[in-house]
Amino acid sequence: MGLVKSYGDLLACRLFLGAFESGLFPGASFYLSSWYKRRELSWRVSILFSAAALAGAFGGVLAYGISKMTGVGGQEGWRWIFYLEAVKHLIINYLAVILAAGGLSPCIATCIAFLSGNISPHTKRATALAFMISVGNIGGVISGQLYRTQDAPRFILGHAVNLGFCAFGVINAVILLFGLRAENRRRDRLYGPTRSSVVLVSGESTSCETDVQNLDICGVGSEEDRRRWGYENMSEQEIRELGDQHAAWRYIL
């Protein structure tokens, strides 16, 4: 808006600004509601709106001071309000990019933890983790062939392939979410909800997670459990080797 040349240009820019800005607070509130529980939401939304109130309280004072810069750089004072606002947002944008890039490493850790918690027994888990790490490292080899010198500076091919893999990952994550959720519900319907502890055949009692994830030491169950699961003719070792196919196993979502 600081670059407009006429009153009509200013009105047009202000119209577009209002149109795109109108969805900010409803969208931000909806976004927060997707992450926080209802009893936690009001505090987060109040922080958001308090920031807007503070901006309104001090924005006028700052604008008044900046408007006194008339003549600096041969520009009117009101233009400097928009120039300085733009510089501030550019700095924040680049800092946000740094934070976004830093968020990639936790993503890797989350994928490893998700895979570890949803695959059993330990031999199957170790194989799956090794395969995942191998595929991830192959990506580094492929990227060197996609980001070619002749494609500089835009690297359209490399970015396009990256975007395609990201979209593929998002689609598969959604499919996996609904698939595992449906499988959990199916097992609940067939075998009933899992219990917080499972008694071993030897008579010893051990504390297990509600979803009996550690089937190397849990999951054999009592006679009643084995009848309910349909495992009465299976040995203790055979039951443990079922891993994530165990009737008491519930996937972590």
Image (tube, rainbow, N blue to C red):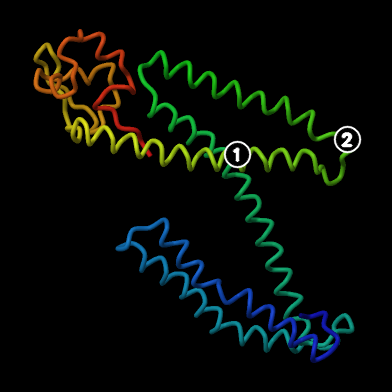
Q: Is residue 123 left or right of residue 129?
A: left
The crowd level at tag 1 (other Cα within 10 Å; few <14, some 14-19, many 20+) is few
Between residues 224 and 24, which one lies in front from this camera angle? Answer: 224
Q: In the image, is residue 178 above or below residue 227?
A: below
Q: Position of residue 191 (x, y in %)?
A: 20, 30
The residue under the point 13% across, 13% down is: 201
Which corner quadrant holds the C terminus? top left
The residue under the point 17% across, 32% down is: 195
Which corner quadrant holds the N terminus? bottom right
Identify which amino acid the numbered label 1 is placed on.
Phe
Q: Position of residue 15 (x, y in %)?
A: 69, 83
Q: Is residue 73 left or right of residue 131?
A: right
SS assignment at label 1? helix
Q: In the image, is residue 52 above or below residue 239?
A: below
Circle 1 residue: 168
Identify which amino acid the numbered label 2 is placed on.
Thr
Mark 1 and mark 2 lie on one chain; the one further toward the N terminus is 2
Most distant residue in the bottom direction: 7
Circle 2 residue: 149
- For residue 18, the mark is none
The residue under the point 24% across, 14% down is: 239
Q: Position of residue 184 (x, y in %)?
A: 31, 35
Q: Nearer the viewer, mark 1 or mark 2?
A: 1
Q: In the image, is residue 184 above or below residue 102?
A: above
Q: CA distance from mark 1 to mark 2?
A: 26 Å
Between residues 85 and 104, which one lies in front from this camera angle? Answer: 104
